């Protein structure tokens, strides 16, 4: 049985990914290493916790001794690395932890994998050949776009927030372990995800929660910032395919071709709530309230996913209308409406 180490599996994308992997690959032992920071939630893993091919390890990706023990004890054959500090707003108020977790944590994992899997540069140990390190990153490393254009894998890095700068740094470390040591690596850079199990702090859960509680629904600036929204399960399937079929040393952008600005997102959620939980003739849109913009707020992100579509055969199954319907339904249950 091959053991794959998934880091950050108690978070939003990680928990959706683990559910997908545990049931799709009964012959893999999925080892989830997560520190359970404020962003991690073991409730997210209820559906897999009793599966025989799932193991949880509580710990920090920066703790080298622990990572070494995990590699040895579980005989780790592959890594899918998601653990990170992930909220841009927090990176503006408290950047230090982003540097620690996203950069030093990624370095620690890479370096332990190198020492455990490889004899020397470009030579894997016997029994460890082709072990792969997949690093889950973000389109925010490319900076911001104007009204037109798309991020491709060739777009130069230009991160603008401490979050995206820390992710860009971690991508560079992964790149260096491929080029210097010959480690088999793949990097995926995905656009904004949405769907079940996202932390309350993020835009879509915040809109739903504030709407239902009758509070103001906060929208940054003029609400015209554009993101390319990707349903989380589509992202997980992209990670799966990139891990199994991706070419070593390559980067794959994953995006939903669903560019929407925040005004559209908030209005769409309010319309769905108006239908599903009507509020005595008044629309939830009346609660929308514009607040001071995020410092250094990137205007537009949009992904060209042609490479993963044509080379690996991935395609997003959800469009925004179908994905947001499922998402709102899930949060209505979570918030007991
Ligand atoms: P999240 O914040 O929901 O989850 C992060 C998880 O990492 C949590 O379970 C947390 O407990 C864990 N963690 C944090 N620090 C840790 C540490 N030091 N050691 C071990 N575990 C630790 O994040 P997410 O939205 O699921 O994002 C997962 C990954 O995907 C991140 O690397 C993020 O940069 C990337 N990404 C996210 C998006 C998005 O829209 N959410 C888009 C593109 C890429």
Image: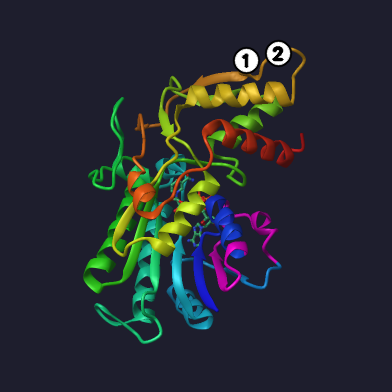
Q: Position of residue 222 (x, y in %)?
A: 44, 19
Q: Residue, x 45% and y 63% (percent of image)?
A: 80
Q: Secondary structure at mark 1?
A: helix
The answer to whether residue 42 is magenta is yes
Range of magenta residues: 23-49
What residue is at 56 percent from the left and 62 percent from the top? 21
Image quarter in which the N terminus is found: bottom right
The residue beneath circle 2 is 282
Q: Is residue 101 left or right of residue 326?
A: left
Helix, strand or loop at label 2? It is loop
User: Viewer-proximal residue, 77 or 214?
Assistant: 77
Image location of residue 25, percent across then percent down: 57, 67
Residue 10 visible to an observer of this rendering: no
Residue for badge 1? 286
Calculate the distance from the C-alpha at mark 2 to the C-alpha at mark 1: 8 Å
- Which quadrant does the C terminus fall into? top right
- Residue at left 27%, top 61%? 175
Query: Quick one: 153 or 146, which is closer to the camera?
Result: 153
- Circle 1: is it few (<14), some (14-19), or many (20+) Cα within 10 Å? few
């Amino acid at each position: 049985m091959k053991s794959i180490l998934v880091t950050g599996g108690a978070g939003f994308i990680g928990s959706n990914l683990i559910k997908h992997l545990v049931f799709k690959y009964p012959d893999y032992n999925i080892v989830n290493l997560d520190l359970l920071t404020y962003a991690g939630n073991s409730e997210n893993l209820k559906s897999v916790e009793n599966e025989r091919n799932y193991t949880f390890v509580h710990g920090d990706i920066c703790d080298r001794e622990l990572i070494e023990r995990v590699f040895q004890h579980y005989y780790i054959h592959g890594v899918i690395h998601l653990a990170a500090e992930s909220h841009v707003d927090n990176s503006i108020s408290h950047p230090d932890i982003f540097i620690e977790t996203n950069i030093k944590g990624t370095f620690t994992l890479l370096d332990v994998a190198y020492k455990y899997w490889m004899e020397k540069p470009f030579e894997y140990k016997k029994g460890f050949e082709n072990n792969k390190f997949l690093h889950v990153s973000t389109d925010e490393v490319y900076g911001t776009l104007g009204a037109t254009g798309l991020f491709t894998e060739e777009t130069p890095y230009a991160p603008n927030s401490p979050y995206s700068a820390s992710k860009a740094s971690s991508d560079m470390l992964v790149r260096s372990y491929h080029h210097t040591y010959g480690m088999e690596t793949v990097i995926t850079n995905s656009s904004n995800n949405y769907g079940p199990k996202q932390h309350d702090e993020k835009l879509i859960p915040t809109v739903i929660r504030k709407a239902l509680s009758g509070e103001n629904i906060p929208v940054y600036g003029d609400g015209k910032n554009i993101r390319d929204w990707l349903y989380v399960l589509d992202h997980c399937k992209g990670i799966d395919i990139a891990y199994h079929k991706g070419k070593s040393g390559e980067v794959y952008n994953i995006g939903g071709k669903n560019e929407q600005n925040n005004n559209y997102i908030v209005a769409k959620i309010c319309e769905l709530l108006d239908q599903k939980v009507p509020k005595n003739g008044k629309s939830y849109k009346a609660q929308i309230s514009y607040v001071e913009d995020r410092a250094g707020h990137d205007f537009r992100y949009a992904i060209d996913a042609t490479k993963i579509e044509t080379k690996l055969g991935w395609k997003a199954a959800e469009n925004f209308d179908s994905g947001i319907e499922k998402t709102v339904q899930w949060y209505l249950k979570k918030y007991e409406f």
